Image (cartoon, helix red, strand yellow):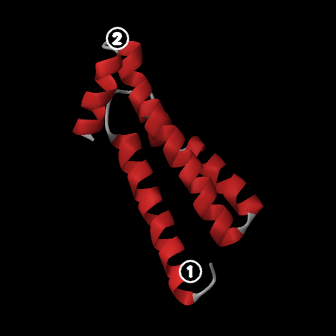
Amino acid sequence: YYVALWVWMRFGHSDWWIRMFSVAGATVAVLATYLLARRVGGRATAVLASVAILANQAFQQHWSEARDYTWLAAVAVVALLALEWSLRRRAGYG
């Protein structure tokens, strides 16, 4: 996280720019949630899961703060997506 934030700050130092780092993490978290839910449960489930994460009060509170909560959520969902992909591949489902 800190290395990524250090790279991010090479392009700007304003308060707005630093907050956009958390927005980028939130975007990755929502997109990864959509992809994971779509692979597991279909399109309707993916839309509901994405809306659920966006409606979460804690997620809304932290997505525009300069903290690592949204990136922690993004890393967790991407890790689950990678695990699901690995298990499907190992089982021969592609």
Q: Secondary structure at mark 1?
A: helix
Question: If you read the primary sequence from the N terminus, does the residue marked by circle 2 or circle 1 appear first?
Answer: 2
Looking at the picture, how far across and down is residue 32, in whole percent? Answer: 55, 53
Q: Which residue is mark 1?
A: 88
Looking at the picture, how far across and down is residue 7, in whole percent? Answer: 29, 29
Q: How many marks?
A: 2
Looking at the picture, how far across and down is residue 19, in whole percent? Answer: 39, 23
Image quarter where the N terminus lies is: top left
Q: Mark 2 touching mark 1, by CB under 8 A?
A: no
Q: Is residue 53 above or below residue 45?
A: above
Q: Residues within 10 Å of mark 2 (few under 14, many from 20)?
A: few
Q: Amino acid at mark 2?
A: Ser
**Front-lying residue, 72 or 86:** 86
Figure quadrant of residue 6: top left
Q: Amino acid at mark 1?
A: Arg
**Front-lying residue, 89 or 74:** 89
The residue at 41%/15% (across/down) is 16
Q: Which residue is mark 2?
A: 14
Whether residue 64 sits left or right of residue 11 in the image: it is right
Q: Secondary structure at mark 2?
A: loop
Gap between marks 2 and 1, in whole Å?
A: 43 Å
